[in-house]
């Protein structure tokens, strides 16, 4: 086991031992049965381990982002930029195909314009396909 792995294991063991002691004392003081104490202990341990894991994962990601590096040498984040703002279309939520560079209709617009109904919508609307005689 590496030194880092040993530190992580030690952290989990120490915090788990402290939490188990606190949970046991609380369970005895509250008069819980063994089953209730075990359920309380397992639930608290799951939450505690999730919190520890989340904190350690955030630290790992922060170290990794520093290691990846900053901006390119020619990039100035404070340089002035020109932003082109299109005039309002009058719609509350304009569709994306009205803007330049749009690839076209999205899936919802394509399905809304299809001439055929799905089997579910035919059943829902009470329509039946007529078989040719």
Image (spheres, helix red, strand yellow):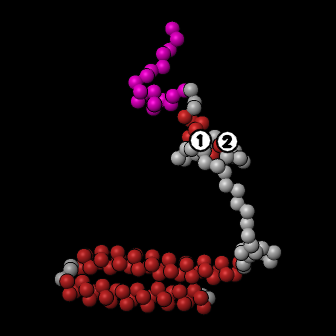
Residue occupying image coordinates x 35% and y 75%: 43
Whether residue 127 appears in magenta in the rendering, the answer is: yes
Outermost residue toward the left in this view: 31
- The local crowd at label 2, few if under 14, some if 14 to 19, many if 20 or more residues have their Cα within 10 Å, is few
Residue occupying image coordinates x 48% and y 89%: 11
Whether residue 21 appears in magenta in the rendering, the answer is: no
* Residue 104 image offset from top left, x and y in percent: 67, 41
* Residue 40 image offset from top left, x and y in percent: 30, 77
Q: Tell me: residue 29, above or below residue 115.
A: below
* Residue 45 found in image quarter: bottom left
Residue occupying image coordinates x 63% and y 82%: 63
**Mark 1 to mark 2 CA distance (whole Å):** 10 Å
Residue occupying image coordinates x 67% and y 46%: 99
* Element type at mark 2: loop
**In front of the other: 15 or 38:** 15
* Residue 38 found in image quarter: bottom left
* Element type at mark 1: helix
Q: Tell me: residue 25, above or below residue 70.
A: below
Q: Tell me: residue 22, above or below residue 100.
A: below
Q: For mark 2, what is the residue?
A: 104
* Residue 24 found in image quarter: bottom left
Q: Tell me: residue 7, above or below residue 112.
A: below
Q: Main secondary structure of the magenta part?
A: loop
Q: For mark 1, what is the residue?
A: 107
Q: Of circles 1 and 2, which is in front?
A: 2
* Residue 54 image offset from top left, x and y in percent: 50, 77
Asked if labels 2 and 1 touch by Cβ distance under 8 angstroms, the answer is: no
Magenta segment, which residues? Answer: 116-133
- The local crowd at label 1, few if under 14, some if 14 to 19, many if 20 or more residues have their Cα within 10 Å, is few
* Residue 36 image offset from top left, x and y in percent: 25, 76
**In front of the other: 10 or 51:** 51
């Amino acid at each position: 086991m590496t030194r880092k792995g040993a530190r992580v294991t030690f952290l989990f063991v120490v915090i788990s031992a402290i939490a188990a002691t606190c949970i046991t004392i609380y369970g005895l003081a509250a008069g819980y049965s063994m089953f209730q104490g075990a359920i309380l202990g397992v639930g608290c341990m799951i939450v505690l381990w999730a919190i520890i894991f989340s904190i350690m994962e955030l630290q790992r990601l922060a170290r990794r982002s520093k290691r990846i590096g900053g901006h390119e040498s020619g990039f100035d984040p404070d340089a002035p930029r020109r932003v082109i703002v299109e005039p309002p279309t009058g719609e509350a939520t304009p569709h994306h195909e009205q803007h330049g560079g749009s690839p076209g209709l999205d899936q919802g617009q394509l399905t809304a314009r299809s001439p055929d109904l799905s089997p579910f919508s035919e059943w829902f609307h009470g329509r039946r396909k007529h078989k040719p005689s």
